[in-house]
Image (cartoon, rainbow, N blue to C red):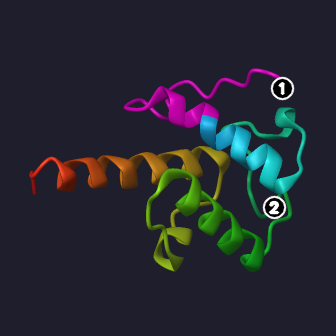
Amino acid sequence: MACISMRGTCAMYPSIEQSVLALMTEHLSVDPAQLQPETQLVDQLYLDSLDLMDLLLTLNDAFDIELGVEDLVSIKTVADVCRVVERRLAGAGQREGGQP
Protein backbone atom coordinates (compact mmCIF):
# COMPACT_ATOMS: atom_id res chain seq x y z
CA MET A 1 0.00 0.00 0.00
CA ALA A 2 1.24 3.48 -0.82
CA CYS A 3 2.37 5.71 2.00
CA ILE A 4 0.03 8.68 2.39
CA SER A 5 0.97 11.51 4.69
CA MET A 6 -1.59 13.68 6.40
CA ARG A 7 0.89 15.58 8.54
CA GLY A 8 -0.74 17.49 11.32
CA THR A 9 -4.10 15.75 11.21
CA CYS A 10 -3.39 13.39 14.10
CA ALA A 11 -0.85 15.18 16.21
CA MET A 12 -1.37 13.18 19.40
CA TYR A 13 -1.51 9.75 17.78
CA PRO A 14 0.55 9.59 14.56
CA SER A 15 -0.26 5.90 14.03
CA ILE A 16 -3.98 6.74 14.06
CA GLU A 17 -3.49 8.42 10.70
CA GLN A 18 -2.07 5.26 9.14
CA SER A 19 -4.67 3.03 10.76
CA VAL A 20 -7.58 5.22 9.66
CA LEU A 21 -6.25 5.43 6.10
CA ALA A 22 -5.72 1.66 5.89
CA LEU A 23 -9.17 1.00 7.29
CA MET A 24 -10.84 3.48 4.93
CA THR A 25 -8.94 2.12 1.92
CA GLU A 26 -10.10 -1.40 2.65
CA HIS A 27 -13.61 -0.63 3.88
CA LEU A 28 -14.48 1.82 1.11
CA SER A 29 -12.58 -0.08 -1.61
CA VAL A 30 -10.79 3.05 -2.77
CA ASP A 31 -7.30 3.67 -4.08
CA PRO A 32 -5.09 5.01 -1.26
CA ALA A 33 -4.15 7.94 -3.50
CA GLN A 34 -7.77 9.13 -3.30
CA LEU A 35 -7.53 9.59 0.46
CA GLN A 36 -5.95 12.99 0.95
CA PRO A 37 -6.67 15.15 4.03
CA GLU A 38 -8.94 17.46 2.07
CA THR A 39 -10.84 14.68 0.25
CA GLN A 40 -14.58 15.25 0.75
CA LEU A 41 -16.36 12.07 1.83
CA VAL A 42 -19.69 12.95 0.23
CA ASP A 43 -18.73 15.15 -2.73
CA GLN A 44 -15.61 13.28 -3.86
CA LEU A 45 -15.94 9.73 -2.53
CA TYR A 46 -19.73 9.76 -3.03
CA LEU A 47 -20.56 8.32 0.38
CA ASP A 48 -24.19 8.52 1.42
CA SER A 49 -25.60 8.54 4.95
CA LEU A 50 -25.63 4.74 5.16
CA ASP A 51 -22.02 4.56 3.99
CA LEU A 52 -21.03 7.11 6.64
CA MET A 53 -22.82 5.22 9.42
CA ASP A 54 -21.22 1.98 8.27
CA LEU A 55 -17.82 3.68 8.33
CA LEU A 56 -18.47 4.93 11.88
CA LEU A 57 -19.40 1.42 13.02
CA THR A 58 -16.23 0.07 11.44
CA LEU A 59 -14.16 2.75 13.20
CA ASN A 60 -15.91 1.91 16.49
CA ASP A 61 -14.95 -1.74 16.15
CA ALA A 62 -11.40 -1.07 14.98
CA PHE A 63 -10.54 1.47 17.69
CA ASP A 64 -12.88 0.28 20.46
CA ILE A 65 -14.56 3.69 20.63
CA GLU A 66 -18.14 4.94 20.44
CA LEU A 67 -18.78 7.29 17.55
CA GLY A 68 -22.40 8.09 16.81
CA VAL A 69 -24.72 10.12 14.62
CA GLU A 70 -23.73 13.32 16.45
CA ASP A 71 -20.16 12.81 15.22
CA LEU A 72 -21.29 12.86 11.58
CA VAL A 73 -21.90 16.61 11.86
CA SER A 74 -18.16 17.27 12.15
CA ILE A 75 -17.02 14.70 9.57
CA LYS A 76 -16.73 16.14 6.07
CA THR A 77 -13.20 15.16 5.00
CA VAL A 78 -10.68 12.37 5.50
CA ALA A 79 -8.80 14.62 7.95
CA ASP A 80 -12.03 15.08 9.94
CA VAL A 81 -12.35 11.31 10.33
CA CYS A 82 -8.87 11.18 11.81
CA ARG A 83 -9.54 14.09 14.17
CA VAL A 84 -12.80 12.60 15.46
CA VAL A 85 -11.13 9.24 16.14
CA GLU A 86 -8.20 10.96 17.86
CA ARG A 87 -10.49 13.10 20.00
CA ARG A 88 -12.54 10.09 21.06
CA LEU A 89 -9.41 8.08 21.90
CA ALA A 90 -8.01 10.98 23.92
CA GLY A 91 -11.28 11.21 25.85
CA ALA A 92 -11.29 7.47 26.53
CA GLY A 93 -7.71 7.64 27.78
CA GLN A 94 -8.56 10.42 30.22
CA ARG A 95 -11.52 8.49 31.64
CA GLU A 96 -9.46 5.31 32.01
CA GLY A 97 -6.66 7.25 33.68
CA GLY A 98 -9.02 8.58 36.33
CA GLN A 99 -8.95 12.15 35.06
CA PRO A 100 -12.11 14.12 34.26
Quick one: which residue is furthest to the left in this view?
99
Q: Is residue 73 above or below residue 80?
A: below
Location of residue 65 in the rendering, given as x and y in whole percent from the top left corner = 44, 60
**Along the line of sight, the residue nearer the viewer: 16 or 71:** 16
Q: Is residue 8 above or below residue 64?
A: above
At horizontal 90% and vertical 39% (from top left) the residue drawn is 31
At horizontal 66% and vertical 74% (from top left) the residue drawn is 53
Q: Secondary structure at mark 2?
A: loop
Please rate how many residues cluster around mark 1, counting C-alpha atoms within 10 Å: few if below 14, some from 14 to 19, many from 20.
few
Residue that numbered label 2 is attached to: 43
* Residue 27 disc label: none
Q: Amino acid at mark 1?
A: Met
Q: Amino acid at mark 2?
A: Asp
Range of magenta residues: 1-18
**Along the line of sight, the residue nearer the viewer: 58 or 72:** 58
Location of residue 87 in the rendering, given as x and y in whole percent from the top left corner = 38, 50
The quarter of the rendered structure image containing the N terminus is top right
Left or right: residue 74 compared with residue 53: left
Label 2 close to label 1 by CB (< 8 Å): no
**Along the line of sight, the residue nearer the viewer: 41 or 88:** 88
At horizontal 69% and vertical 39% (from top left) the residue drawn is 21
Question: Which numbered disc, 2 or 1, marks the residue closer to the eye?
Answer: 1
Q: Is residue 85 above or below residue 56?
A: above
Location of residue 2 in the rendering, given as x and y in whole percent from the top left corner = 82, 22
Q: Earlier in the sequence, mark 2 or mark 1?
A: 1
Magenta-colored stretch includes residue 12: yes
* Residue 1 disc label: 1
